Amino acid sequence: MTDGLDEDFDDKRRLILDRARDCFLRDGFGKAAMGTIARSAQISTATLYLHFPSKAELFHHTILDTSEHFVGMMRAVRFGSGAAGERILNFARGYAQFLADPFVRAVLRLIAAERDRIPQAAADIYERGRREVGGPLIAALRTLASEGRLIVEDPATAAGQLMGMIEHPLFMSAMMLGDSHRLERNLDQIAEDAVRTFVARYGTAEPVPSERITGKDGFAASHRTIG
């Protein structure tokens, strides 16, 4: 009997978080009303407050729940095997696709807009991103360096540089100009350009002309080996 009640509680909480996310994305934190969220979830406002005592707490939990979805999206990105450039390109493409996702952009814009009002939610999702997205990249770069495929003294700094080259044309343009802004480069080009620059900086010193980073159209590192 208890298991059934727990399952019903969890299902109701799941529905509340889904409807709250829709409402916050549509109306923002300030205009979103607990009564509207309750009606959307087909529960009473009293029941909503039983699950979440305040709108701020509901917003915080909604952001944390959404971060789980984000992590799942990035965990699907695999570095794979092969040359260093090929492994890094797998990550770069996956990260570019993640940042280009309209849902991801909408949530990140919401967090940025409400950062001062709900600072803990912004801090939590930022730290989660560093740990769950940046962490695997740092570990991969450290492994490639130990294999002699890259010359990287500070994997964390190098990871930030790679991610920054992808974030700037995707995240910054969306933040400032909106999703309708047409990118000057497509996602593959953004990822490939970032990896080409990264490899030029961190590739090992001995040139190996036969080694290539192969993207959608193909490109090669001209003066550094890439694994």
Image (cartoon, grey):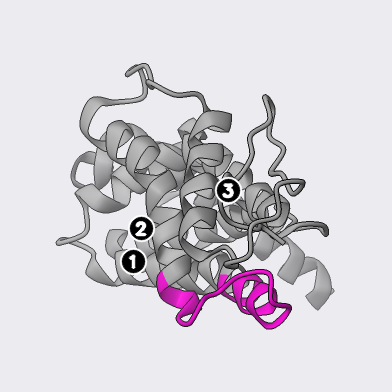
Q: Which mark is residue 59?
A: 2
Task: Find residue 165 and report its horizontal and vertical position in percent.
Answer: 39, 48
Residue behind mark 1: 121
Q: Mark 3 to mark 2: distance in Å?
A: 30 Å
1 or 2: tag closer to the N-terminus: 2
202 left or right of 58 in image:
right
At x 62%, y 45%, the residue is: 94
Which is more toward the observer, 27 or 184? Answer: 184
What amino acid is at disc 3? Answer: Ala
On the image, the x and y values in percent for residue 178 come to: 29, 26
Q: Residue at x 65, y 64 (%)?
A: 9
Local packing at callout 3 (Cα closer than 10 Å; few below 14, some 14-19, many 20+) is: many
Q: Amino acid at mark 2?
A: Phe
Quick check: marks 3 and 2 in contact, CB under 8 Å?
Answer: no
Query: Which stretch did the figure color magenta?
Result: 138-157
Q: Secondary structure at mark 1?
A: helix
Q: Position of residue 201 (x, y in %)?
A: 46, 60
Is label 1 in contact with label 2 (beta carbons under 8 Å)? Answer: yes
Q: CA distance from mark 1 to mark 2?
A: 8 Å
Left of 29 or right of it: where is 220?
right
Q: Is residue 4 above or below residue 218?
A: below
Given the image, on which type of amino acid does mark 1 rest? Ala
Ranked by sequence position, the earlier of labels 3 and 1 is 3
Q: Which residue is mark 3?
A: 92
Q: Residue at x 60, y 45 (%)?
A: 221
Q: Main secondary structure of the magenta part?
A: helix
Instruction: From the image, state whether disc 3 or disc 2 is nearer to you.
Output: 3
